[in-house]
Image (spheres, rainbow, N blue to C red):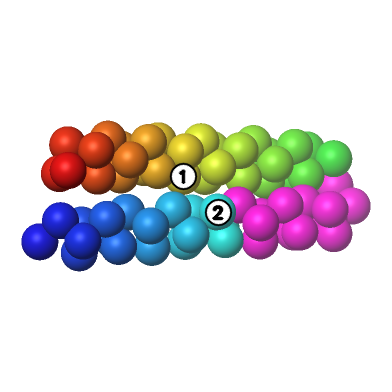
Amino acid sequence: MGNKMIERFTSRVGEYRGQAAKLRILAYETRFAESRRKLLMLADSFEKLAERVEARGSAFATAAD
């Protein structure tokens, strides 16, 4: 049971970081400054979400030991 939970956390972290990367690419491709700023802010939000999920997964793994 514990390993499956850790795998889910890891999978979500990867998904969130992947979304952040895609948003950054879109931001750098857009020529509109305000759109670029909003895309980069959204990318940062996804990165922070990934960090929170990763920390939660680490805490869960530590508790499971």
Residue 29 picture quarter: bottom right
* Numbered circle sitting on residue 17: 2
Position of residue 10 in the picture relative to residue 50 (left or right):
left
Image coordinates of residue 14 in percent, x first then y, are 48, 59
Image coordinates of residue 60 in percent, x first then y, are 22, 41
Between residue 36 and residue 46, name the one nearer to us: 46
Residue 21 appearing in the image: yes
Outermost residue on the right side: it is 31
Callout 2 secondary element? helix
Q: Earlier in the sequence, mark 1 or mark 2?
A: 2
Image coordinates of residue 19 in percent, x first then y, are 56, 58
Between residue 58 and residue 21, name the one nearer to us: 58
Is 34 above or below relative to 24?
Answer: above
Residue found 74% across the figure and 45% down from its top: 35
Q: Amino acid at mark 2?
A: Arg
Residue 49 appearing in the image: no
Outermost residue on the left side: it is 1
| Residue labelled with disc 1 | 50
| Magenta segment main secondary structure | helix
Residue found 44% across the figure and 53% down from its top: 13
Residue found 47% across the figure and 61% down from its top: 15
Position of residue 42 in the picture relative to residue 58 (left or right):
right
* Numbered circle sitting on residue 58: none
Asked if the residues shown at circle 1 and circle 2 are in contact, with their CB atoms under 8 angstroms apart, the answer is yes
Is 1 above or below relative to 59?
Answer: below
Quadrant showing the C terminus: top left
Residue found 68% across the figure and 46% down from its top: 39
Callout 1 secondary element? helix
Q: Is residue 21 magenta?
A: yes
Position of residue 59 in the picture relative to residue 33 (left or right):
left
Q: Amino acid at mark 1?
A: Ala
Q: Which residues are magenta?
A: 20-32
